[in-house]
């Protein structure tokens, strides 16, 4: 991987000084070695341990985490091989051809990013589906695409109580039972040890064939390299490719922990981000991969970064005196050029991270158009955009003027191999935590999602009452809530 | 449709005064009647004419546009019926089961939004694919999913010279010929009268079966209701549903032109947008539909709005003294809650447009979880989020404090019928042009994309030289360009 970004030498020096003063690299290393870097929840943050093949123990609460991770990887290897070889099948004996991941947020978005990026390697005759949204249309669309007898459902929830996930899991269970299929042959879980979804057989509500464990020292948005991504990705791509993906991520972790600051790509990217947001005042950052299979990178980083660094207080609970967290958005190029780049060039400026892939997968389609291949045409655009943004161009006609001086960085990855995608994933994880370490915030908690959950729970209770007593009115509620709930219940009857 | 937004009475009065002073409604009406509202390109903007069933002529350059649109709709109806009934087939006689739209930006994104929103109605045994990105991975992925003998390709390009589209069209042509299939039985075009892709038979480079016309008075990003969306959507959904979709859009146009300002939904939404960006200073706007089939709404509006209003000069070419264009982004809820809502609640605030669907399509899946259906669970969250954002909540623990006072609007649509989706589409079109009319900018040109195209063309020429003379070095180029081009060409050899 290569990172190129235009910032002037003195700025870079000052930014590196800031990183040093904040002890960014030391904090990164202490994270990897199992320190409690998530103090508000009293937890370590050990996503890096999920891809640590060094054999060096990392101990948390008396558990050697790397050994535990190896044990889980072995379970994944064995289970997915059993599925691919037809030793584990559905209850009518049909081999599994559809895998549905039931999970939301960190329990699925990273997996979707990686599966989309590596779709050219999905050669195990297994289609991967995601049932994330509690919206019944998501369920309806998924079940219209599967063959129930050949479907394995994976319920992903650390607590096994996530409202959306459990609602969908319940629906899926009823759907399978209605078709005479045994849930304990068609459902597996990825969950905490001892959760209501753990331990096959012992739990009557959700009889599952297998459970794979997840841990409180790996947060959802950092969990792609754990069992959360490991089980579905190994089913879809084969375990070996999942391991190559982990090895790529591990290479980036080693780089992020040990490279000299000025050559440390995630650290430099974090500093450029802080420069853009805090010193140049930009409120957003676009991520534009010139690669259609990286279509889900921006949504993944949107979650990873905005949930991690969308904070307003320091680790000590003091109001943060710097800007933390910007809006992350993006679509693949060249599509984005034809969509929102008008604003990037002539409207409100925002920094852009361009991503290029050096070597394309489909080498066999190579007709020339205007003297170049499609991959070259793509690159002509990838190289032109940063220049157009930076240089601008004057024109007598004010409608055709380009102010220029608009910042961007360019990241290259070698190809769309599992290893390269692993590096990219770990790059964004390291960039995110580096930014947090420099700003002094906690990138591992997410208390900001609690209030919405609480209020939704109140409204849900009110709906449940109405369901059991249809004559009950909403007159006791405030007018706005009454308006909406009456509209909803009127439509349903 | 219903729009609810919390703004105080006096603010609304002042905003309505602004709209009146700028003659917003008059400009909207003159747009509909064919005035040159795009003066920098000397064009009318008549997307509304594509769904005007009133029979009233609208004349531009001596052509009655509504009659012309009716003629094209009749052609679409007849052609798609011929395909559905098997009268028009591929060159080996197989009925068409795959339709691939080759087009980029405005030539496909709106169609993808509508096709995704109405996927539950895609019952014509036709799969719809999009080949938009020049990235060869996009081509590779599409051709791995189709049966060439049963594939109809639709090339969408007004000029028939768009670099990406022509590169993909060339590849597709070679791909089909290699398989012994006659292009003139498998390709159709949607293009301007007289373009190199028009007139079946007369053009040797691109022999097409049929051409449907598009016009310079409908810009790409406003073209979903023209032949651009009409042909693929009618093939996918049936012409009748496409017409219902147009009727919904037309109802919104009539509302946008005639409703009293204070009850005019797109006008009010435009004013709220101006209030949020210019008076409250927000740089972005999230669109969060609580409906997974509306997953492509935010990307569509991102293009529609950011390309239309990402301008810095007025109609007269004077520097604009107001802020125009904000960043549009979004993902469906509840997914977004688990992704980036941490930042929305506790990090940098940004206004959110929530969208709810009153009546779900899949009524048959109705298990209760925690006493409510999935659709009710979805709504509990839809209703909870605006409250959590607005009200906030205090807490002794600073990590658990919610500042509140964060703005949002809520839009309801009745269902995911073609008519409702048409209303939603036309709502965002009208909202976008209303904002431009009030600010005094031109929402119909896009000169900001030209510089990037020009620079890409220079780089492409340099690549083409290297392709024809592999010994040629890049030493004459600046070091950065040399670095990248050497990397690319080294990888290819």
Image (cartoon, coloured by chain):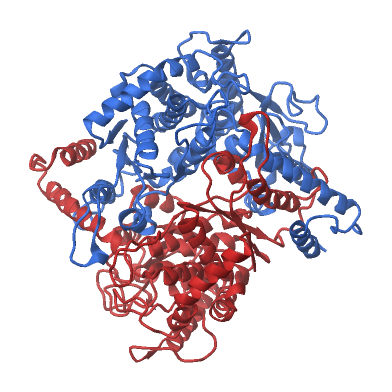
Chain colours: A blue, B red
- At x 61%, y 60%, the residue is B7
Q: Position of residue A159 (x, y in %)?
A: 70, 29
Horizontal arrangement in the rendering, residue B233 relative to residue A289 (left or right):
right
For the residue pair B302 and B460, the one nearer the viewer reads as B302
Tell which of B233 and B208 is nearer to you: B233
Residue lying at the far front in this picture: please name it: B10
Q: Residue at x 58, y 42 (%)?
A: B341
Please indicate whether residue A9 sits to the left or right of residue A344 in the image: left
Instruction: Note whether residue A123 is visible.
Output: no
Please state, as top left, top right, bottom left or bottom right, where the C terminus of chain B lies in the image.
top left
Residue B78 vertical position relative to residue A304 in the rendered view, above or below: below
Query: Residue B104 in the image: x percent, y percent?
Result: 37, 60
The residue depicted at 37 percent of the width and 80 percent of the height is B44
Q: Is A192 rendered above or below residue A145?
A: above
Question: Residue A313, how many percent across, how many down?
Answer: 54, 31
The front one of B484 and B97 is B484
Q: Quadrant of residue B65?
A: bottom left
Q: Is residue B68 visible?
A: yes
- Spot occupied by residue A408 in the image (x, y as percentages of width and height): 31, 42
Is B463 drawn above or below residue A63 in the view shown?
A: below
Q: Is B200 located above or below residue B5 in the figure? A: below
* Picture quadrant of residue B248: bottom right
In depth, the one of A14 and B213 nearer the eye is: A14
């Amino acid at each position: 991987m290569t990172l190129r970004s235009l910032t002037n030498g003195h700025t870079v020096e000052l930014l590196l000084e800031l990183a040093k003063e904040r002890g960014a690299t030391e904090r990164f290393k202490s994270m990897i070695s199992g320190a409690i870097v998530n103090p508000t929840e009293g937890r370590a943050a050990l996503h890096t341990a999920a891809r640590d093949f060094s054999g060096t123990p990392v101990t948390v609460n008396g558990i050697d985490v790397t050994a535990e991770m190896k044990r889980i990887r072995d379970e994944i290897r064995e289970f997915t091989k059993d599925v691919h070889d037809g030793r584990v099948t559905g209850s009518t004996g049909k081999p599994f051809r559809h895998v549905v991941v039931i999970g939301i947020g960190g329990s699925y978005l990273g997996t979707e990013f990686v599966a989309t990026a590596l779709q050219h390697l999905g050669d195990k005759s297994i289609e991967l589906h995601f049932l994330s949204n509690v919206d019944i249309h998501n369920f309806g669309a998924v079940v219209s695409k599967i063959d129930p007898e050949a479907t394995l459902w994976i319920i992903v929830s650390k607590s096994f109580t996530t409202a959306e996930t459990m609602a969908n899991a319940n629906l899926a269970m009823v759907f399978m039972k209605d078709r005479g299929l045994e849930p304990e042959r068609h459902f597996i879980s990825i969950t905490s040890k001892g959760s209501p979804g753990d331990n096959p057989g012992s739990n009557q509500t959700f009889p599952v064939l297998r459970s794979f464990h997840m841990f409180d020292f790996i947060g959802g948005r950092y969990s792609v390299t754990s069992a959360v991504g490991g089980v579905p990705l190994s089913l879809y791509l084969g375990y070996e490719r999942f391991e190559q993906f982990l090895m790529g991520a591990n290479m980036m972790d080693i780089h992020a922990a040990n490279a000299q600051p000025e050559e440390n790509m995630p650290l430099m990217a974090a500093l450029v981000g802080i420069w853009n947001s805090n010193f140049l005042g930009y409120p957003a950052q676009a991520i534009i991969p010139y690669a259609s299979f990286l279509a889900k990178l921006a949504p993944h980083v949107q979650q990873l970064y905005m949930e991690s660094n969308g904070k307003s207080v320091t680790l000590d609970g003091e109001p943060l005196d710097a800007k933390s967290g910007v809006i992350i958005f993006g679509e693949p190029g060249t599509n984005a050029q034809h969509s929102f780049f008008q604003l990037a060039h002539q409207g409100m400026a925002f920094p852009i991270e361009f991503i290029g892939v050096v070597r394309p997968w489909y080498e066999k389609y190579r007709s020339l158009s205007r003297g170049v291949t499609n991959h070259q045409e793509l690159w002509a655009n990838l190289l032109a955009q940063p220049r157009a943004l930076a240089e601008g161009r004057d024109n007598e006609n004010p409608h055709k003027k380009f102010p220029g001086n608009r910042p961007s960085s360019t990241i290259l990855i070698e190809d769309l191999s599992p290893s390269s995608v692993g590096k990219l994933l770990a790059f964004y994880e390291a960039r995110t935590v580096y930014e947090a370490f420099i700003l002094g915030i906690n990138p591992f908690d997410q208390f900001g999602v609690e209030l919405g959950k609480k209020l939704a729970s109140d409204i849900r209770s009110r709906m449940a009452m109405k369901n059991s007593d249809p004559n009950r009115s909403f007159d006791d509620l405030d007018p706005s809530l009454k308006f909406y709930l009456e509209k909803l219940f009127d439509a349903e009857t």
